[in-house]
Amino acid sequence: MNRFLLPLGAFLLLALFLALGLRLNPREVPSPLIDKPAPAFQASTLARPEATIKREDLLGKVWVLNVWASWCAACRDEHALLVDFSRRGVAPIYGLNYKDKREDGLGWLGRFGNPYTDTLFDPEGRIGIDYGVYGVPETFVIDKAGLIRYKHIGPVTPEVLRDKIEPLLRKLDANA
Amino acid sequence: MPMLERGILHALLALLLGLSLAAARATEAPVVAANPEIEARMMVLAAELRCLVCQNQTIADSHAGLAEDLRQQIREMLAKGMSERQILDYMTERYGDFVLYRPPFKASTLLLWVGPGLLLLLALGTLWRVLRRRQAMAPEAFDPDTPDEDAAR
Amino acid sequence: MIPELGQVLLLLALAVALIQGVLPLAGAQRGRADWMALARPSAYLQCLLVLAAFACLTSAFVRHDFSVLYVASNSNSLLPLPYRIAAVWGGHEGSLLLWVLMLNVWTVAVARFSRSLPNVFVARILAVLGLVAAGFLLFMLVTSNPFDRLLPAAADGRDLNPLLQDPGMVAHPPMLYMGYVGFSVAYAFAIAALIGGNLDATWARWTRPWTTAAWIFLTFGIGLGSWWAYNELGWGGWWFWDPVENASFMPWLVGTALIHSLAVTEKRGSFKVWTVLLAIMAFSLSLLGTFLVRSGVLSSVHAFATDPRRGLFILIFLVLVIGASLLLFSWRAPSVGLGQRFGLLSKETSLLVNNMLLAVACGAVLLGTLYPLFLDAMGMGKISVGPPYFDTVFTLIMAPLLMLMGIGPLMRWKEDELSGLARRLRWALVLAIGAALLTSWAAGRIAPATTGALALAYWIIASMGVDLLERLRPRGGMSGGVVGRMRLLPRAMVGMWIAHLGVALFAFGVAMVKTYETERDVKMTADASTEVAGYRFRMVSVSDVQGPNYVAAQALIEVSRDGQLLATLRPEKRIYKVQSNPMTEAAVDSNLLRDLYISMGERLDNGDWIVRVQHKPFINWIWLGCLVMMGGGLLATSDRRYRSRQTRSAELPAGMAGEGTR
């Protein structure tokens, strides 16, 4: 009797994994860069082409990197939230203008508001590739030592901001 | 033929030759790839990588912007002399194992790679045992033999 | 009004399906002839109701009724009529209705062509089919109602996905579902036999034609899907090991094993336990496929709009149906007889090994498809398992199988010996290897793996040749020339040969195209040309064309060889008006020896177009192989044994007589 129960047993095990699978999102790709140093970059800023900004400039503080583009519809969904966030002064947000044209990017910020302390200009998307960006918008939290601590894929929602990003920012700020 | 006429004839011939050469070159469509050898190697690598935007195509086949950027990136890395292993590592550093269509050999994928072979051995072993057991059983346990209707082989 | 009518019809169908599922089953247990007699009429009635509901949905599409949510999501006022009808099964809800319709078609066929089967048996079979239908109808009504209204009605629809607006795509789902769903018949036969306790050779003979028919449809559906993808998707690939493709391939592998297992059970009474398990597994894999495609658990280009709630419902249904079946199996299997004896080296054993290899192949595909889910569920990260894995693993398992296909059919039942076999087959082996080397050399390059694959394809054919010659050779006491002896060959045997030939053709096509295909990407402008594989491709012009619901840039490309114009191809880059994503419409010049495949890439700033030209030798042998496999199956199904009325009633097995009291 027992060896004929094997198919049933195997099937139930399979069903268990399928049930677990229902709560997962197969399309979401987690970042392998969490807890690793943020990749080095050196980019011109969006507003002033002659100025450059390097990763080293941002060491010693906790900051947020938001990847956006003027052609990205979903970026508009989160933008008001980011503008509001920047006004509260919790942590500086830096923008990464991804695969965009300078005029389009500046025009977009002019129309919808500018929450960024400064914006990196990445027309070729090279910095994006280094950060593992595959869709806009994406948002990173980087700590004082320059390590990436969190990545959010898709528009930032009030819940994500309230439950994940802000507590993390406070925790990282408290550390030396 | 007098000098002037010969000169003019030569000039005309040269012009004609030049024009026909230009014409022949104009009709041959140039290959897109600047360097066909690197292109071929790039496509082989790109076929191993998953496009993260559409997620169900390789970077070789996908028309997504990111796929094109990554193909260009691979071309540059190959031109710099990086090996295939180094390029695949570059991709996984940034995008994780998800980007590889050929799963890496790790502790977590051991079952995946060894699984089919294991299944085969298990099945063969089970088969062997079942057949052995049947050989050892008394003839009464089986149905009576009927003649083979297929052939008088 | 009509959508509401459709909804009522579905509710009625559910009620009838429940009656069909419960009463005859109970009646068979209790010997109530009146309850059992309800089986056939309710099957017919349910089919009528579902057909009517399907007609209601179709009419909503034809009439552009955008107040029905499903119609608004999958159709458009510009969509041509044939595609409006195909759009009925273009989305999740409608395709479920198609599923149920197909199930009803098979059920009615069983009800109609089962006159010679014992009533109790038929009652149980139809009841099982009724329960499955009830489950799907319930699923539809609770989570995926195609008749839901959209109020206020949309001004216009969101259009059918442009990828689906193609003839191949119209036929592919119905054929595929006929196959998927067709295995429910073998499943129902198995369950009915397990309940009744009468698994034997006669049961196998009844089940065989139904299973082969389902297998034929599934082969067609998968082949059609592959051929469609090749022509439509624009990059020349024809199989991607996508989770949904795998979901249709796994039942095919197990279904093939089932056909072979049934053959042995019918002839020798052996393998009964394996056969029943395979029958349960084939349909279970169909159901699993339904789950994978509609639950959002796996990422796939085929996946329907996903909803975890739907996934949960299907999963529960899956657990109930498959769990109950396997429980029944574990209870009844120990008392099933062993059939006749057979030796270690025999046709029975080779068929067992054959089935084992097919099952392992199926297991490997399942492992690869679900492994990312498995790791993610355990929190061990996300990986991808794609063609590099599947191609490697699958071909390694298939190689011994192809080898076996050349040996098994020549083996004797019960007992055979190695030296005799070796003697009969040695020339076939030599011929196969020789032909493979010759082919590789003629193609221009001898690649070891390819030559091996070609040798296997030739080996199957050569072995068949040996088999045929042996049977046509004059034997003691037999007269009447070659033709007479050919007529005596049973259809089932000729069908087997043809089906195996199909496999050999398929393997040949795959080996040749994968090894010897070439491609080139060029920038083309008017009058530019390029050469690939000895063919010259010249772009004449690019012009704008208007389709019924799209605009396109169409290139005119002339293909010539040695100065002779062979074909004029018109690849397009289409932009569909509603969904506005660009679509590549490749142009293909096909013949038996090769395909010339042209697709347009991007338009460059200076007006030039990037064009990809591909030469694919022998690619049509892949789909030709599928068609030939189907032909073999068809021939086998038409064997006299399944049509003769006298043999059946005379052969009622012992267990059947006292059925009413069980």
Image (spheres, coloured by chain):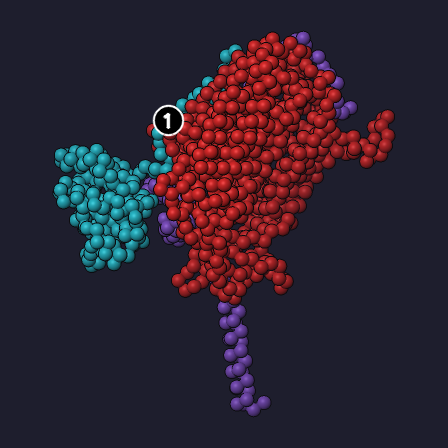
Chain colours: A cyan, B purple, C red
Q: Residue at x 46, y 51 (%)?
A: C78
Q: Residues within 10 Å of mark 1 (few under 14, many from 20)?
A: some
Does residue C571 sit above or below B15 in this rendering?
Answer: above
Q: Nearer the viewer, residue C625 or C216?
A: C216
Image vertical order of residue C527 relative to residue C6, above or below: below
Q: Position of residue A93 (x, y in %)?
A: 19, 45
Residue type of the residue flagged with mark 1: Leu
Instruction: Give the answer, above or below, for where C511 lies relative to C494.
Output: below
- Per the image, label 1 sits on a secondary structure element best described as helix
Residue C55 x/y as whole percent: 52, 37
Please give left or right for residue A38 compared with residue A14 in the image.
Answer: left
Residue at label 1?
A20
Residue A141 appears in the picture as rendered: yes
The residue under the point 27% across, 46% down is: A75
Rendering quarter of residue B130:
top right
Q: x%, y% of residue C537?
A: 55, 60
Q: Chain of mark 1?
A: A
Residue at 32 percent across and 37 percent down: it is A30
Q: Residue at position x 74%, y 21% from top? A: C646
Can residue A55 be spotted in the picture?
A: no
